[in-house]
Amino acid sequence: MEFPVDRYRLDTLGCNDTIHFNNAGCSMHPMQVVESICNYLMEEALTGGYELAHQRASLLNDFYNLGAEMLHAAPNNIAFVSSATDGFAKALSSIPWHTGDVILTTINDYVSSQIQFASLHKRFGVEVVRAANTPQGDVDIDSIETLIKQYQPRAISITHIPNNTGMIQPVEQIGDLCEKYNLWYFVDACQSAGQIPLDVTSIKCDFLSFSMRKFLRGPRGCGMLYVSDKALKAGLEPLFIDMRGADWTEANKYQPVPDAKRFEYVEQSYGIITGAIAAMRYYLNVGPDQIALYNAELCAYARQQLSAIPHIHLQDRGARLSAIISLTSDRSDPMYFKEILNRNGINAGAAARKFALLDFDQKGVSGAVRISPHYYNTFEEVDKMIAVIKENTI
C-alpha cells in the first residue's frame, strides 16, 4: 500500500511554509499534539492544576500505557522525565560507583553522555573505555567483548543512533553481551524513538531514555525512561530521589516506590504529558514499521542525490543507516551551509566539532551539516533542497 504522506502533511501546519529537515533536532508537531496541550491548559486555567490532574488521572496514566506499548514493556517500567539527558543522568546516578569502576562506551555516544562520563571520572575516579569501530564505522562487537574481558566494566552505554552520523548501532548484539557478562546496560534511544521500532525485550537493556520532541513529534520538555525489572529488583534509584519516587518513613530514612516512578520528580507539566500521549498515539496509529520503511526510502533517495554533487561529501558511517544524513561541503563551513538552507525555507541542523569531538576528529572534519527527513516530508522537498545547494555557493 502506498504511504499516505499527504494525510500526515495535512496534520502538520508547518509544512505549508517550510521544508523541515531538522527532525533529529525537533520535529514539527501534528495538530493533535498541539490541541491536546492547549485544551488541557485551558481546562487547568478553569479548574486548577492539582484538581484537574486528579480528575484526569486515567487519561494521564496513558503516558505509561502507551510508552509500554511502544517499547514492548510493562507500564511499571516506564518513568516520565523532562528530557533524554535527564533520564540518562538519573539512571547513571543510580549505580553505586566506586573508584576504579569502568564504563565501556563508544566514540559515537552522545556528547552530554560523554561529559557525564568525564564528570564521573573527575569526581569518583571512574574510568572510561571506548570500543573500537569496524572499518564501516559501527562499533566493533568483538572489540566490546575483548574489552569486557580485559576491564570487567560495571556498565556499558550505547547511543542507538548517534546524532552526528547516520549509523544504527547493533544494540541487540551488545545486549546479548551484557546479559552474558551480567553488566548494567544503558541505551540512549533519543534519535531512534519515533524513527524505527524499539523492543526492549530484544535490546535487553536496563535503562533506555529518549525525548519526545525529536522523531516522535511530541512537545519539548518531556521524555521517557525505561527501567528494567532487574534494575528495580536490585533497588537501583536516582541519587537525588524525591517525594514522587519515595515515601519518607523516619527522620533519616525513606522507602522507594516499587516501580520506575522512583525516577520521577513530583513536579511535572501535565499539559506537556497530554501532548506526549497524543504524539505516541499518533505514532502508533501511523505504524512504526511503515514509518521506518518510508524513511529508509526517502533518505536513500536523498543520499543518492547528495552524493552526486561533486563538492558534497557524505559523512555517514555504518552498515545500517538511519534518517540522519551528515555531510560536509568543500565550499563552505557547516554553519554557513545551514544558514543558506534556512534562508531558502529549509530547516536543517549543523554540529560543531565540540558536539562530536572523537567522531569528527577521526573523520578529519571540523563539523557537519545534518539533514534529517521524516515521514511527513516528500521526495519533492528533497529535490528542492538539492536545487538550493546547486544554485548557491554551499
Image (cartoon, rainbow, N blue to C red):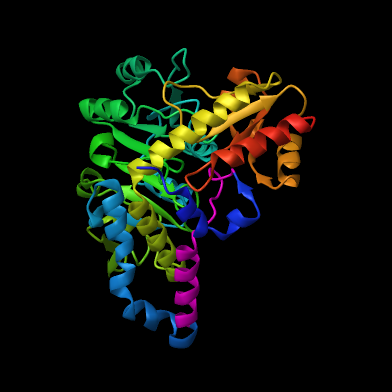
31 to 19, vertically: above or below? below
Image location of residue 32, percent across then percent down: 45, 65
Image quarter for residue 60?
Answer: bottom left
Question: Depth check: 291 or 338 in front?
Answer: 291
**Quadrant occupied by the N terminus:** top left
* Residue 32 horizontal side relative to residue 53, left or right: right
- Screen quadrant of the C terminus: top right
* 342 falls in the magenta region: no
Q: 11 or 199: nearer the eye?
A: 11
Residue 42 located left or right of residue 263: right
In this view, the residue in front, 69 or 147, is: 69
Q: Which residues are the magenta region?
A: 21-44
* Residue at the image point whose x is 24% and y is 49% from the top: 73
Farthest-out residue, bottom: 46
Give how far across and how far down residue 241 sits, in percent: 37, 58
Residue 165 in view here: no
- From the viewer's perspective, is 23 left or right of 180? right
Residue at 30% x, 50% y: name it: 70
Q: Does any portion of residue 337 appear in the rendered image?
A: yes
Does 35 sit above or below residue 70? below
Taking 268 as reference, is 342 above or below it? above
Which residue is pictured at 33% across the width and 76% down the height? 56
Q: Where is residue 250 in the image (x, y as percent from the top left)?
A: 27, 68
Is 31 one of the magenta-colored residues? Answer: yes
